Amino acid sequence: MSILNDEAFALFMSGKGGGYQPIPLVGLYNPNAVRAAGCIQRWQDISKILPHDKPQKILDIGCNLGYFCIVAADSGHTVDGFDTDKEVIYWGKKIIEEFGIPGINLWVASDDLLSNLRKIPDDSYDYVFYLSVHHIITSVLGWGLIKLTKCLGKFQELLQIWFLIWGSLMK
């Protein structure tokens, strides 16, 4: 049975969990979800920053259902995403599996952001997205921001994404 016909998935998408993240590539879009349009706009802004001449390695912290992972992978990038919500990761993996979307690895993370970041080797990623967890990052700004920088290996890209986030919030 297709995930699109799964009653549990329909219930999940109509609730507060993953229903706000659209997945247009597979026909999932909740027009009543206020944040759905924001996801699409954020991706349009991010895609202007990402290089298009070679695939990038991206980490999406707090990826939820995986919208940004999926659209980045569809653009040719390799993406790792994690979230503390087991249900969103479960359904995100189901979508990726059913629709054969390559280049994405999703996992459930512990509630402690820093312990998750400590497990990531330095210089592992070209870009790090933390689009809906910036408030958590800033609350642990000292070590967390330093570790994010080491994961990136490039402080410039971190700043670009940081300013993108705050720019989106200030609109």
Image (cartoon, rainbow, N blue to C red):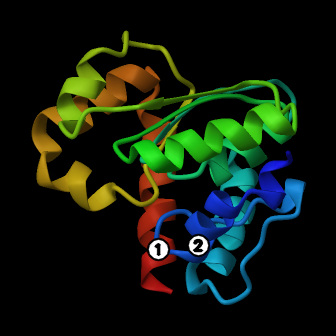
Q: CA distance from mark 2 to mark 1?
A: 7 Å
Can I make out residue 51 in this image?
no
The amino acid type of the residue labelled 2 equals Tyr
Q: Is residue 133 above or below residue 90?
A: below
Residue at 48%, 15% in the rendered image: 124
Q: Which residue, given by chain and number where applicable, does mark 2 sit on?
A: 20
The amino acid type of the residue labelled 1 equals Lys
Residue at 68%, 79% in the rendered image: 37
Q: Residue 139 or 50: which is nearer the viewer?
A: 139
Q: Secondary structure at mark 1?
A: loop
Residue at 41%, 60% in the rendered image: 132
Q: Are marks 2 and 1 in contact (CB under 8 Å)?
A: yes
Percent x, y for residue 83? 41, 42
- Seen as rendered, the residue at the extreme top is 121
Q: Is residue 112 above or below residue 171?
A: above
The N terminus sits in image quarter: top right
Percent x, y for residue 53? 87, 29
In the picture provided, is 167 more to the left or to the right than 95?
left
Q: Which residue, given by chain and number where applicable, does mark 1 sit on?
A: 16
